[in-house]
Amino acid sequence: MSPTSTSTSSPATSTGTSVFEIGKHKTLLLSVETTGSSLSALPPKPLLIATPSEAGEFPVLLLLHGYLFYNSFYSQLIQHIASHGFVVVAPQLYCVAGPDTTDEIKSAAAVTNWFSEGLDKVLPTNVLPNLSKIALSGHSRGGKAAFSLALGKTATPKSLKFSALIGIDPVDGMDKGKQTPPKVLTYVPNSFDLEMAVLVIGSGLGEVRKNPLFPPCAPKGVNHEDFYKECRKPACHFVAKDYGHVDMLDDDTKGIRGKSSYCLCKNGKSREPMRSFVGGIVVAFLRAYLEGDFSDLVGIRYGHEKVPLELQKVEFLD
C-alpha cells in the first residue's frame, strides 16, 4: 500500500448472499492524497477507495460525488459495493464549485486516465484492478458529470473505456430551461449515443420540496425520469418510492455540509434501506454488464428477490 494511503476495515462483515446485504469480501477503505507521496504517479485528485482486502482481480467502479458533498459521505455505500467484489474509486473533484461542471468532468477523465498508471500501486498486495471492466457512476450533479464524461463532453482524451454507466438520482440543473453547463439533456427520446448499458436510479421524494424556501433537490424536468427517457437499450430504471435524493449517503455526515443533507432535501424515515437498495442494485447491474451474470438483475426485475424498500417504478429497455 502507498505510504500516503490510510485504511480502515469495513465494520460490516456479514456473509449474506443477497446483493442488498454486505457481501463475502472483507473490505478496506483507503484514502489517497495528491501530495507527500513516494508514488511515481500521483492521482490528480484526492481519492477514497473501497476495495476487497484479499487477493484477486476485480472490476472497477468510478463514483462521482454530488454537489458540494464530500466523497467521505459515500463511505458506507462504496464499502457495500466493494464487499461484493469491486474496487470503487470516489475522487474528491472539488470543495467549492459554481454552476459550470466542465472542470469536474475534466478531472473525472484525468482520474480515469490515472488508473493505468497508479491504481494498482495504492491497492493492497495481490489486489489487481481489472481495467478492461470499468464502470462510471455519479450521484446528483455527479450523475450529470458521469453522463457528460460518457458522452464525450470534455476535451480531455480518455485512455480507458467504460463498459457501463450508472446515474444515481442524476440532476441536470435547477429546472428545464435552467440546465447548468454543459447541458446533458436534449429532450429528444433515446438520443444518448453511449454504446454501453445504463442504470438510472431515482428517488420518489427527490422532486418534493423539503420546505417553501428551497427548491426540490431533484426537480421535475431535469431528473432521473428525463435521463432515462434519453437512454437507448440496454437500459434500466428503478425508482425508490418513499426515499429522498440523499438517502443513500452515510448515516453520519459530518460538518455543515453533512448536516445540510438532512435539512435541504426531503428524506425518508432512515437512510439504511435506500443505501442498501442503491448498493444492491448497482452490484446486480455490474454483475450483469461487467461479468455476464444477469441472475440478480433478472430476479429483482421480476420480483423474485426481496428488496429493502418499495419500488415506485421498474423499467427496462432491452
Image: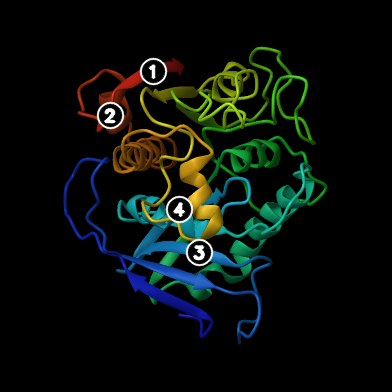
Q: Disc 3 versus disc 4: distance between alpha carbons?
A: 9 Å
Single out the residue that lies furthest toward the right: 155
Q: Amino acid at mark 1?
A: Val
The kind of residue on which mark 3 rests is Leu
Where residue 169 sits: x, y (%)?
Answer: 52, 32
Name the residue beneath numbered marker 2. Answer: 309
Q: If you read the primary sequence from the N terminus, does the residue marked by circle 3 or circle 4 appear first?
A: 3
Per the image, the residue denoted by label 3 is 48
Q: Give how far across and how far down residue 254 sits, in percent.
A: 46, 60
Dot in front, 3 or 4: 4
Relative to 208, is 11 above or below?
A: below
Distance between mark 2 and mark 3 Cα atoms? 28 Å
Camera-nearest residue between 254 and 27 = 254
- Seen in the picture, residue 288 relative to 186 is either above or below; the reply is below
Q: Are marks 3 and 4 in contact (CB under 8 Å)?
A: yes
- Residue 264 visible somewhere in the drawing: yes
Nearest-to-viewer mark from 2 and 3: 2
Crowding at label 4, few (<14), some or many (≥20) Cα neighbours within 10 Å? many
- Determine whether the residue tagged by mark 2 lies in a helix, strand or loop: loop
Label 2 to label 4: alpha-carbon separation: 19 Å
What is the number of the mark on residue 291? none
Q: Nearer the viewer, residue 219 or 287?
A: 219
Rounded to the nearest angstrom, the CA distance separating label 4 from label 1 is: 24 Å
Q: Amino acid at mark 2?
A: Leu
Q: Quadrant of the N terminus?
A: bottom left
Q: Is residue 133 visible?
A: no
Q: Earlier in the sequence, mark 4 or mark 1?
A: 4
